[in-house]
Amino acid sequence: MSGGAAKKEEKPRKFQAIKGVRDLLPPETALWNRVEQTAHEVFATFGFGEIRPPIFEPTELFARAVGGETDIVSKEMYTFEDRDETSVSLRPEATASVCRAYIEHGMQQLPQPVKLYYMGPMFRRERPQKGRYRQFYQIGAEVLGGIDAPAIDVEVIEMVMTFFDKLDLQGLRLSVNSIGCRECRPKYVELLRAELLKVKDKLGPDSQRRIETNPLRVLDSKLESEQKIIEKLPRISDHLCKDCAEHYAAVKQELDLRGVKYRENWRLVRGLDYYMRTTFEITAQGLGSQDAVCGGGRYDSLVGLLGGPPTNGIGFAIGEDRLILSLQESGKAPVVRSRDVYIAWMGEKAHATAVRAAKDLRKAGFSVELPPVEQKFGKALGQADKLGARFALILGDNEVTSGEWTLKTLADGSQAKFTEPNLLEHLCRNKALSS
Ligand code: HAM
């Protein structure tokens, strides 16, 4: 005998997903797929092609693009040393990657602008709460190269709104702003800093710190006690240079032209360093404090900053988790039925017929559950009910012999008999009516 006295058996550890990350499960995943499919379709109508950048990149890429002082880079990235001792990070966003790819693949040689979109997981070590996760999903798009015409900014916004409309997302509010350029913003920032220093004592510790590091972010503050003070600060709209003022005016004109409703928010500065001129954010209903479902803006110097040729850029990213949450909260999430038909069969002859029926129904696009072993009809119907099937197809030896199959509608319990071809026709008609 080996091992001697019986060692106390350890219960195997049960694992749980890490804090702030979660499993997406059916039937909800069907909604995710529908949302993503709609994005593919709508973005294609605007001439965008899909890019799939990697999930991790050199840490330096994000530090350079998003900004070393930003919360995202300084506190929230998942960073590790690879075996060759290079520092890599899970992507906290994808604009940096898209710009890196634009340069790496010489996309400036392509007809400009290059229009790309992406979808996938992003990672930020934030405090988890409703609508805020450490692994979350974005659907984003970027326009790179070509001119910086205001109509491009607005077409990008129009594309998001078209996508949201198609999904029937409720309670949408679009806020826009211009945060100026390298010419006018530094002067405004200095003015803002000087004004903030005058009221420093009345500000909270975060804002006090930001007077030095990034005074623009003070405008973002949600702290109740700071709101009245912030309202009295100088506004960037009064300090834009001539080119930026004209660009912003044209953006607003284009929004009107396209019938896109918006409001101006001079405090919309965004938490990433690469923006200039147009910034925008969209909120939706049912999300509580984390109600920004999309954010974006123009970033004309980013590609240059990453070692590429001077290149204009504008884009946005939608928080897919929040988008789904908002659809669910407003009752606009379409009900996805898990099965159209449950085949309740009994008997050997019926089994062969059931296998054939399942094949034909699936070929016609129906979702079919075919139990692997025979079940008493009562049990089978109970199972069909639990699965939320729409119909039960009852196949016993009688049905097979007579060629008349019984179809039960589970919602009202009604039954009708059909021949095989009639059944398919009936189901197809029904599907067309219900979709
Ligand atoms: P962002 O504002 O950092 O922008 O993120 C865009 C959206 O992603 C947010 O509005 C929100 O819906 C969602 N999001 C952000 N963090 C989380 C989180 N922890 N949990 C759930 N959802 C979240 C960007 O990422 C820029 N790259 C957008 C962009 C593209 N600008 C130009 N091009």
Image (spheres, helix red, strand yellow):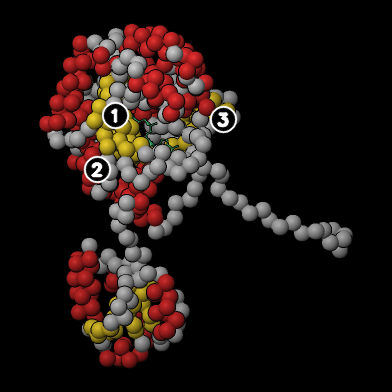
Marks 1 and 2, the one that precedes in the sequence? 2
Q: Residue furthest left?
A: 257
358 or 1, nearer to the observer: 358
* Residue identified by numbered label 2: 163
The N terminus sits in image quarter = bottom right
Tag 3: amino acid: Phe
x then y, percent, for residue 125:
51, 34
Q: Secondary structure at mark 1?
A: strand
**Distance (Cα) linking label 3 and label 2:** 36 Å
Which image quadrant: the C terminus?
bottom left
Quarter occupied by residue 316: top left
Which x, y percent locates residue 102?
32, 26
Where does label 3 land, which residue? 80
Please determine whether, in this image, residue 41 is positioned above or below residue 306.
below
Q: Which residue sits at x=32%, y=91%?
A: 398
Q: Is mark 1 within 8 Å of ligand 1?
A: no
Please tell me whether mark 2 sits on a helix, a strand or a loop: helix
Quickly name the residue at label 1: 280
